[in-house]
Amino acid sequence: MNVRKRMASAMLMIIMMCSLCVSSVLAEDMKETENVTILFTHDMHSHMDSYKSLQKDQTVMIGGLGKLKTIADQKKEKNPATFLLDGGDFSMGTLYQTIYETDAAELTMMGRVGFDVTTFGNHEFDYRSEGLSNMLHAAVQNAKNDPDLNLPALVSANIDWEKNTSEDNLLVKQAMDDYGVTPYTIVERGGVRAGVFGVMGEDADDCAPESGLEFEDIVETSKSIVEQLEKENVDMIICLSHSGTNEDKKKSEDEILAKEVPQIDVIISGHTHSTLEDPIKCGDTYIVSGGPYCENLGELCLVQKEDGRWKLENYQLNSLDETVPGDETVAKELEQYKNKVNKEYLSEFGYAFDQVLAENEVEFTQMAQFAEEHEEDSLGNLIADSYAYAVEKAEGNDYEKVDVAIAPSGTIRDTFQKGELTVSDAFNVCSLGIGADRIPGYPLVSVYLTGAELKTVAEIDVSVSSIMTATQLYPSGLTWTYNPYRLILNRVTDVKLVTNVPYSEDKEWNEIQDDQLYRVVAGLYSAQMLGSVEDTSKGILKIVPKDKDGNAIKDFEQYIIHDQNGAEVKEWYALASYLESFEKNKEGIPQVPSYYGTYEGRKTENASKNIMDILRNPNKIAVVVYVLALAIMIILVLVVRFVICYTKKRAIRKRKED
């Protein structure tokens, strides 16, 4: 009997071992013949429904989570080993962000369409620690209320919690813990285990001044995470990197990451809004980007090699255009959110989501080309003019003349297409930030600058924007002429004030007095950046925003512009109300004036190579440079003369000795 039992046990063990071997072979064969599909997005910026875009000279409706879900579901049905991932900045960009704190609309909808993992971008911190904490708790509550809702995993590996110990930092950490944010997660699809981690790069960190957090180096963090993931026996390692790529290889953070941490198989690269028609391949690492605003759903298909790494089988950007049907369930969910935005946010301004403000026939610059060239821009002009208009409207009988209004390119987030312009369109153009009132949207602020500082403002636009495109400035009430061949920081040759803005035929130019104070209106963030010019330029340029009595401003929130009811005047509201103010067309709809489609002379280039034009009227910076250059030349001449004299004397002495 014992012999029979032993024989039976032995036979059972042999059968089990054979089964394991067969399973192993089958699994290995499957990895060799089956591919892995990675679907990806980044920089969606709350673009959850379709929006207008200029495609091949035609305005069409593209994008949206409804179309994304349609394609994603099709891909998942074809291949069980399909992952849906996002590279951060999923929020901040449309009216849906106004219920970010209370409803977590973006994160919730990402869960409903089937995203597996996402990470933080810099804009997730736009509403500061309190805003992000509230959003994460709202998402958790949504999941509790709906058992069918699977929120995407959130991964963030390089927040330095040893340094981030303030009260606000701990508030964010608690919210992240409550949500379940981890440095990495492991997702298994179709028998493939993918280790996914998230990082935020240096430039993105610099673009998140409201986060209050310090982030560790992405390379060192990634090395540590990869080491941990290799112990988890994952089949592939994916990095959700909100860092970006750049034509300048020294600034291309994700290319540097790929070279320094070659064990990473795929980097989904966000932040720089790049659209890569082909992956960037660094060794065995693929870097992919599909463009911003949910315009495309990126698709990367890989096959595992014998050494365990992965090779490219297919790569494409699935355009979410008008040929893709939207998912009806997603459409219904978004309609509910839209109604909530109308009720809880827009009603306070007397507007509705899809309300038509104006008709437009002007061809405004598309965002892909916006601020690429240093030049006057119709959209920038329109926005700056709207600031001056809104202040006069808000202050009523207490209005004090606005001399200058300034709109920087870095705060302009979208453009206008031809056709009807809605409240939603206006908001998308100026969607950033939150005010002191904790209501979404940066408010306008009023400061005073001297005439000399206005000239510095013009110089920043001309000299600095060629290096940092976000600093290109669009003025109302101010005009300048510049010569690109002059010394950097000395390129502006003339600055004047302009009356009768917008610039009509009877406009007048006035000379600027260096010591006189002028009233300047800008967005809260822009005004704060003006105040940091001295630090940024290492003291070379200096602008000190002041109050009307000439005292330096320390807290810009104290100088926010309010209307007669005490409400903050938001940037987007200034633009929306300005559009409504235009003269009506035959259909009774305000019409964007045609002069916004023409050159108005706010910035004038005088590209003269004449030596006198290049050297005349130098500013203090140029004088210092010229003096230094002259001093160096004199020293060189003296050195040369000394060498010649010394050589001659030595030659004479040698002849005498001979």
Image: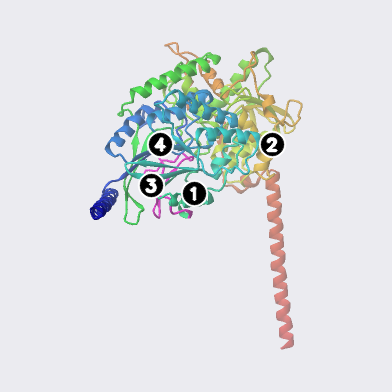
Residue 260 x/y as whole percent: 48, 54
Tag 3 near tag 2, CB within 8 Å: no
Q: CA distance from mark 3 to mark 1?
A: 23 Å
Q: CA distance from mark 3 to mark 2?
A: 43 Å
Amino acid identity at mark 1: Ile
Judging depth in this view, the residue of 645 and 154 nearest the camera is: 154
Q: CA distance from mark 2 to mark 4?
A: 47 Å
The earlier-in-sequence mark between 4 and 3 is: 4
Relative to 231, say whether 111 is above or below. Answer: above
Residue placed under numbered mark 2 in the picture:
543
Q: CA distance from mark 4 to mark 3?
A: 22 Å
Quarter that holds the C terminus: bottom right
Amino acid identity at mark 4: Asp
* Magenta highlight: main SS: loop
Q: Is residue 133 left or right of residue 229?
A: right
What SS does tag 4 mark?
A: loop
Residue density around tag 1, few if under 14, some if 14–19, many if 20 or more, within 10 Å: many
